[in-house]
Amino acid sequence: MKREVQVYYGNGKGKTTAALGNCVKEANVGRQVIIIQFLKGRSPEELSFLTKLEPEIKLFRFEKEGAFYLDLPEEKRREEKKNILNGFNFAKKVIETGECDLLVLDEVLGLIDLQIITEDDLISLIELRDTSYKLILTGHHISERLLEHVDVAAKIEQIKG
């Protein structure tokens, strides 16, 4: 297995679910899986289910606030940005050390939309390691430039409802 970068993006529901399907498949054959979620707040319902998948699938969230990032007052937003960047830096460490076979960065594309990280930051992360591992990115938008660094891209659109 060589490095493979996948992305699930678009305005439809199911991006995280698609990524989780890959996680279950990889964990089922004994591969190490890590999920780092961004911009999800501290939703207890989703967290409680995902933690049931441990230790086969390890889940990390670095945000402390329950509210969405843009809904926070400026002072709390600055603090939350530091937490989010800690999560992004943790992702770099995971890739550099080869700590897992599959790393999912859920809603990482939203960090670019919110100007918390740049496209260059994400491209640098993608290029940290070219040996055998799989990286999955999710979010709403992806640029043509970023698409050049991705092996598989799936756009998930809401057609009805």
Image (spheres, helix red, strand yellow):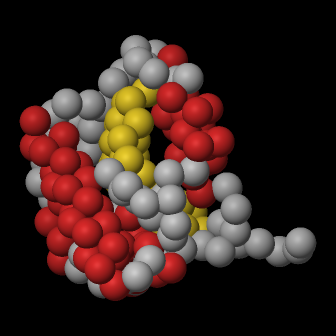
Q: In this view, does 21 lie above or below 112?
A: above
Task: Quadrant for the N terminus, please.
Answer: top left
Residue 80: x and y, percent?
Answer: 31, 67
Toward the viewer: 6 or 52?
52
Q: In this view, does 48 lie to the left or right of 94?
A: right
Place of residue 114 in the rendered image (x, y in percent of width and height, measured from the top left): 38, 82
The residue sitting at 44% across, 77% down in the picture is 72
Position of residue 123 in the picture relative to residue 26 (left or right): left
- Give above or below for 58 relative to 43: above
Say which residue appears at 50% left-offset and 52% top-offset: 42
In the rendered image, the vertical position of residue 129 relative to residue 57, given as above or below:
below
Residue drawn at (19%, 30%), measured in percent from left and top?
99
| 97 relative to 43 in the view: left or right | left
Q: Can residue 30 be seen in this view?
A: yes
Residue 103 percent location from the top left of the image:
34, 42
Residue nearest the observer in this picture, 131 or 82: 82
Q: Which residue is drawn at 34% across and 84% down?
A: 74
